[in-house]
Image (cartoon, helix red, strand yellow):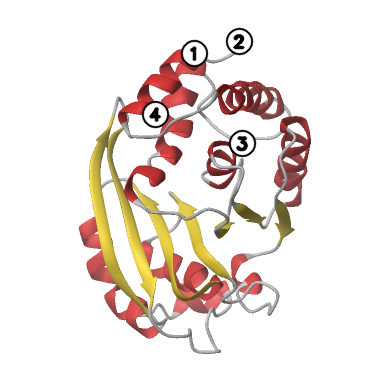
Amino acid sequence: MFIPMDLLKEKATEYGINLDDKALERFDLYAKLLVEWNEKINLTAITEPEEIVIKHFLDCLTVFSKVEIKEGARIIDVGTGAGFPGLVMLIARPDLKMTLMDSLNKRLNVIKDILEKLELTADVVHSRAEDGGQNKAYREKYDFSTARAVSNLRDLTEYCLPFVKVGGSFIAMKAAKAEEEISAAQKAIKTLGGTVSEKHTFELEDAGERNIILIKKISSTPAKFPRPSAKIAKNPLV
């Protein structure tokens, strides 16, 4: 056993999330593989087993305690990195139709290796978010898009909301100061066809404030969005 699985099970239960033995075994192997791969490619600064449990696994799992995600939902994790939150969500809920997208192919090679060893299936897509959002194969095809701890909410919405079909939601997982980010992102959210429908703020044990923000897609995103990243940086939607 690599991680304290009892701790993961106990803490997940506190959030109303039930992890069966198979899920716990997969989390244990995921953590072991993550640390092994991290010696070859920089994936995470968090490598202590107990910290992985709380700051990666539990942090990602909290989405299930705040958002109703129906069986078989189509989800795209944008900028998945080492699989956070998308792969964590898939381990807990193998019924999900998960797409893991990242701009760095060597990270995706790690993801493919981990998926194979966990005996799980997901679509693994090598693409920048702004290119993927303009690709008909992915644009407005998902019930949810997710992103964790990357970029500000204004820019993140431009990258992530185009993947969501009307009626679905973008789930943004943020740390502190979410209210400021929401305020700064209001024009962008409206322009891109969304509205903030929910915000959940809570303390994650030993990890500080966490916020899960739901941006509901109420109308199609105009065709010109997402723009190239250089344009997003130079001319933000403010």
Sequence order check: which comes first, mark 4 or mark 1?
A: 1
Residue kind at label 3, given as amino acid type: Leu
Q: Is residue 91 left or right of residue 118?
A: left
Q: Residue 111 location in percent, x, y? A: 71, 41
Residue 238 in sight from this viewpoint: no
Q: Residues within 10 Å of mark 2 (few under 14, many from 20)?
A: few
What number is the disc on residue 4?
1
What number is the disc on residue 83?
none
Q: Residues within 10 Å of mark 1 (few under 14, many from 20)?
A: some
Q: Are marks 2 and 1 in contact (CB under 8 Å)?
A: yes
Residue 218 in sight from this viewpoint: yes
What number is the disc on residue 43?
3
Sequence order check: which comes first, mark 4 or mark 2?
A: 2
Q: Where 169 sits versus 199, above or below?
A: below
Badge 4 is on which residue?
A: 12
Observer-nearest of 123 and 160: 123
Q: Residues within 10 Å of mark 4 (few under 14, many from 20)?
A: many
Q: Where 73 sits versus 116, above or below?
A: below
Q: Residues within 10 Å of mark 3 (few under 14, many from 20)?
A: some
Residue kind at label 4, given as amino acid type: Ala
Sequence order check: which comes first, mark 3 or mark 2?
A: 2
Given this view, does label 4 or label 3 mark the residue nearer the observer? 4
Q: Residue at position x 72%, y 46% from top?
A: 121
Q: Are marks 4 and 2 in contact (CB under 8 Å)?
A: no
Helix, strand or loop at label 2? It is loop
Residue 142: quadrant of the picture: bottom right
Badge 2 is on which residue?
A: 1
Q: Residue 206 location in percent, x, y? A: 30, 25
